[in-house]
Amino acid sequence: MTLRMLVLVAASISGGAMALAQEIRNETVVEAADALGMVRGAARRMDSINTIEFSGRGMIRRPQDDGSWWEAELTNLTVGISYSIPALRWDQATGNQRVIYVVRGDEAWEERTPGVGNTPAMNFVDRFSRQIWFSPHGLIRAAIEAEAREPGSVEIGSDAGRSTLTVEVNGFTLTATLNEDNRPQTVSMPVTHPLLGPTVLSTHYGDYVDWPLLDVFFPSRIQQTLGDVTWLDLEVTEFFQNPYVVFPDPLP
């Protein structure tokens, strides 16, 4: 591979986010990135965490056509995310039922097992794409990239004494409130649900833990609501930074 090709590949992988912390003038964004462990190395780079994977168990709900909510015990949920592609795999088990959804760029499909089986699921593109940027590291990475492209594009505010930031990514407008440690505590965005209509999707992150003991923090509790109904309540049991997470075209 030629040097020019290597440069092009590196640029496409980073998505233009190869930003040093000192190049981002938005102090709130830098402090949040630092609090999550995203500012790494002597050069203070903010793009060293490119993939994450977390697993957990809890409860999941889904609205039904008749206005009721289907509910099930979530025996396992494993989510793998690549911020550089971007892509996400949502591997969910409720009892004896397992479903796997993958979104990569503007494509989405279901898999029988990871990387195997290909059933198009284009109606899930928006639903799972936004989960990439709803994640704590995804939100701050989106803010880093926005500030690198256009300084001042991330709106900083305050709510009850806590810093807030608002960033637009891929047509989504996300607003986050940071906790006392400058880590995302709540993230919300307006959505139009096919059954609920216009509503707000919100995530609350609690009890951050240094899972790998490398000063990289991720919450141990995730609660996500649609309007005033909690549809996901997850106790996180594992978290990995920069795991080997791939999103190939699935085998037939």
Image (cartoon, helix red, strand yellow):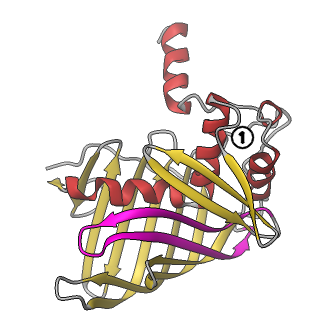
**Camera-side residue of 129 and 215:** 129
**Camera-side residue of 53 and 18:** 18
| Secondary element at image label 1 | loop
The magenta stretch is 182-210
Q: Residue 114, percent across and down?
A: 31, 59
Q: Residue at x 35, y 42 (%)?
A: 105
Q: Residue at x 44, y 43 (%)?
A: 170
Q: Quadrant of residue 150?
A: top right
| Placement of 218 over or under 106, stated as above or below | below
Q: Residue 144, percent across and down?
A: 66, 41
Q: Is residue 190 magenta?
A: yes
Note whether residue 114 is visible: no
Q: Which residue is mark 1?
A: 46
Dominant SS of magenta comes to strand
User: Which amino acid lies under the numbered mark 1 shown in the image of this protein?
Assistant: Met
Q: Residue at x 40, y 71 (%)?
A: 199
Q: Residue 233, percent across and down?
A: 49, 83
Is 10 placed left or right of 58 in the picture?
right
* Circle 1 crowding by C-alpha within 10 Å: few under 14, some 14–19, many from 20: many
Is 244 placed left or right of 148 in the picture?
left
Q: Residue 25, percent across and down?
A: 80, 36
